[in-house]
């Protein structure tokens, strides 16, 4: 099914399979064997209850990516999944980054986009989550961001970033657009963790997408603050620049383990937004039309 044919809402930044375990405690893991049935059940239930139609899955190289597991989850849940390629932020860079130039890194990504992940039969539909931390990317992070931009320009895919705790998005945007990549093919990640409405407005004014994509992660930021930041950006006239999601990145976040689950956006946050005056048309824009336009670069009138 073409992405532009999606009629239900999308989650713009999630993880269905993941391994970011550096502490050895197994917390930052979504195992393709142990957790697949729980992940699949949640997505299937959201498809029935809310019409969930698409998940943008941003687990990339060095993050425990498993394209075959993603294909099984999509088939079993009935929810389409867009897989990703790229590199996360520096603490999680694999050895292949070290000493490799931007052009060679871009070639790795282009090869995956053109030919798929090995013999899995799965090809990425987005570059992400391309990461940095701090106010400016480090040298290795600069290389991976530039490589993603070059791959995007060559293949026509879009780039979704990881801005650690929301910081550094303006520097990411400067780097990416400096290659000629149009802002509307860029999503700046985790901006709901940065209580800086002026920064959000500057990002949106450029034409880039502003991702409020950690909804429900109350230990990082309260949803009340997220809602205030969202309403501020809406009041400034940038509804068409907003992406929403929950960034489930630990198995403890799953509903089956007592967490908020993939449905928190629909069951908790959006009802609060509606009570604050966000109508159905705005909700559809933020949860369906914007993610589809980001992924495809389509004209707003086409979706």
Image (cartoon, helix red, strand yellow):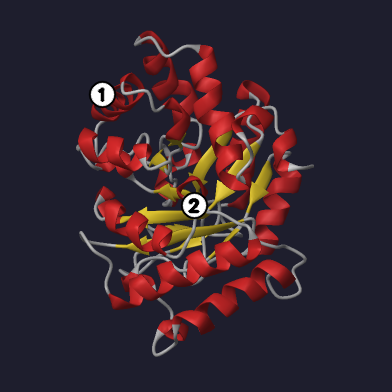
**CA distance for labels 2 and 1:** 29 Å
Q: Is residue 258 above or below residue 30?
A: above
Q: Is residue 22 left or right of residue 105?
A: left
Q: Is residue 212 visible?
A: no
In this orientation, which residue lies closer to the viewer: 121 or 112? 112
Whole-percent x and y of residue 179? 45, 65
Q: Residue at x 31, y 72 (%)?
A: 91
Residue 120 left/right relative to 198: right
The quadrant of the picture occupied by the N terminus is top right
| Quadrant holding the C terminus | top right
Residue highlighted by disc 2? 182
Q: What is the crowding at mark 2: few (fewer than 14 residues within 10 Å), some, or many (at least 20)?
A: some
Q: Which residue is mark 1?
A: 228
**Secondary-structure class at tag 2:** loop
The answer to whether residue 225 is left or right of residue 230 is left
In-front residue for pair 140/219: 140
Residue displayed at 49% across by 67% down = 148
14 to 17, vertically: above or below: above
Image x and y of residue 171, in percent: 28, 58
Of labels 2 and 1, earlier in sequence is: 2
How far across and how far down the image is residue 288, in percent?
Answer: 58, 30
Toward the bottom, the furthest residue is 99
Q: Nearer the viewer, mark 2 or mark 1?
A: 2
Q: Position of residue 59 (x, y in %)?
A: 51, 59
Q: Quadrant of residue 123?
A: bottom right
The residue drawn where x is 31% and y is 23% is: 236
How many residues crowd around disc 1 within 10 Å: few (fewer than 14), some, or many (20 or more)? some
């Amino acid at each position: 099914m073409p992405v532009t044919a999606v009629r239900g809402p999308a989650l713009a930044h999630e993880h269905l399979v993941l391994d970011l375990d550096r502490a050895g405690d197994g917390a930052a893991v979504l195992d393709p064997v142990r957790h697949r049935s729980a992940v699949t059940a949640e997505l299937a239930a959201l498809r029935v209850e809310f019409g969930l139609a698409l998940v943008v899955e941003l687990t990339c190289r060095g993050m425990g990516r498993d394209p075959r597991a993603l294909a099984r989850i999509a088939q079993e849940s009935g929810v389409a999944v867009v897989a990703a390629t790229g590199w996360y932020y520096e603490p999680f860079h694999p050895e292949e980054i070290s000493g490799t130039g931007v052009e060679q890194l871009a070639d790795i990504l282009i090869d995956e986009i053109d030919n798929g992940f090995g013999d899995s039969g799965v090809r990425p539909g987005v570059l992400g989550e391309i990461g940095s931390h701090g106010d400016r990317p480090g040298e290795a992070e600069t290389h991976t961001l530039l490589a993603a931009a070059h791959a995007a320009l060559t293949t026509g895919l879009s780039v979704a970033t990881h801005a650690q705790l929301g910081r550094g998005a303006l520097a990411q945007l400067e780097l990416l657009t400096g290659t000629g990549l149009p802002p509307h093919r860029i999503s700046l990640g985790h901006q709901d963790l940065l209580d800086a409405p002026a920064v959000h407005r500057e990002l949106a004014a450029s034409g880039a997408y502003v991702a409020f994509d950690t909804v429900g992660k109350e230990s990082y930021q309260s949803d009340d603050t997220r809602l205030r930041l969202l309403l501020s950006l809406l009041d400034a006239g940038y509804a068409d620049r907003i992406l929403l999601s929950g960034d489930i990145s630990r198995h403890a976040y799953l509903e089956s383990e007592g967490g908020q689950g993939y449905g928190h956006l629909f069951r908790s946050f959006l009802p609060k937004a509606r009570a604050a005056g966000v109508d159905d048309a705005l909700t559809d824009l933020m949860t369906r039309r914007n993610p589809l336009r980001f992924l495809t670069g389509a004209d707003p009138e086409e979706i």
